[in-house]
Image (cartoon, grey):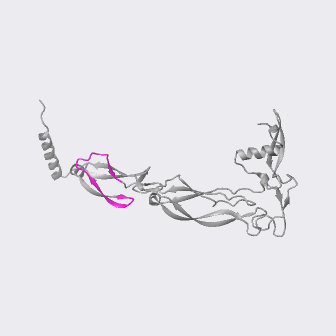
Amino acid sequence: MSLQDFGSPFDMFDQLFRNFGGANFGAGNMDGEDLLYTLLIDFKEAVFGAQKNIEITRLEDCPTCEGSGAKPGTRSYICRTCSGQGHVISSSRTPFGYIQQAVCCPDCNGMGERCSPCNRCHGEGRIKKHKKIDIKVPAGIDTGDQLRVRSEGNSGMRGGAPGDLFVQVEVRGDPMLRRDGNNILYSCKISYIDAILGAVLEVPTVDGMAELKIPPGTQPNATLVMAKKGVPLVNRRNRRGDQLVNVKVEIPKRLRSEERKLVEELAILNKESVPISN
């Protein structure tokens, strides 16, 4: 793409900025900036969703000048430096020759207009204000996910569109439960007697305490599945992951004499039950 393809250097500059999504200085307005807010939520709020109220600080139209930046009772005028274009052409010498570059006008800050500045916003057209916003946190959200709230960022300048608010989610850890995608992980310890004979335990879940059946003959580090006790899929609350329980079998280091006698009798019975191969 060469300079000859355009009617003027300004045409080239405008085309380049349209291609890259930049601001159009010559338009006299600028879109507002996006804002980022970090929201810390509890483990169960991430699992089931929540309604949160946050307070942000953003730039809004100055009520004194109604966003124009001009002192009330005065009118803006075209910037003489850039002739209302919002940008000027700068030339620089390089080993390849002279290069012309369009840059933001230093006198009007790219607006193309100048004015007697408003006393409240000092000509910016925007002032900082606090605002409370309700945020709907969907079920199944996780750390690192972002929520987008349209048009709740900084106000645009001179009639430009407002930016968006991006809410970055961080989830507090749970002391007993861990998350792995849509599954929840939990570890429990059982006695070797319960591992042999089986048992029913009360274990924590995101739904509260629930019964976990330990089948007879459960092996150390076995994983038991509590179906549909995990995290709902985002925007699909009727589908949930599972809770996976890692079972650790505790072997006592010391036995009382009565226990040792019973274990020895069990060992004898176990040997007698083993068939002798020919």
Q: In which quarter of the image is the N terminus?
A: top right
| View extreme (top): residue | 278
Decide whether residue 114 is among the magenta residues.
no
- Quarter occupied by residue 109: bottom right
- Quarter occupied by residue 133: bottom right
Q: Where is residue 232 in the image (x, y as percent from the top left)?
A: 43, 55
- Span of residues in magenta: 204-227
The answer to whether 221 is drawn above or below residue 98 in the figure is: below
Q: Quadrant of the C terminus?
A: top left
Left or right, 173 with reference to 205: right
Q: Where is residue 87 in the image (x, y as percent from the top left)?
A: 81, 50
Q: Position of residue 241 (x, y in %)?
A: 40, 52
Left or right, 147 with reference to 223: right
* Residue drawn at (64%, 66%) of the image: 130
The answer to whether 113 is drawn above or below residue 16 in the figure is: below
Q: Is residue 173 visible?
A: no
Q: Where is residue 159 in the image (x, y as percent from the top left)?
A: 73, 60
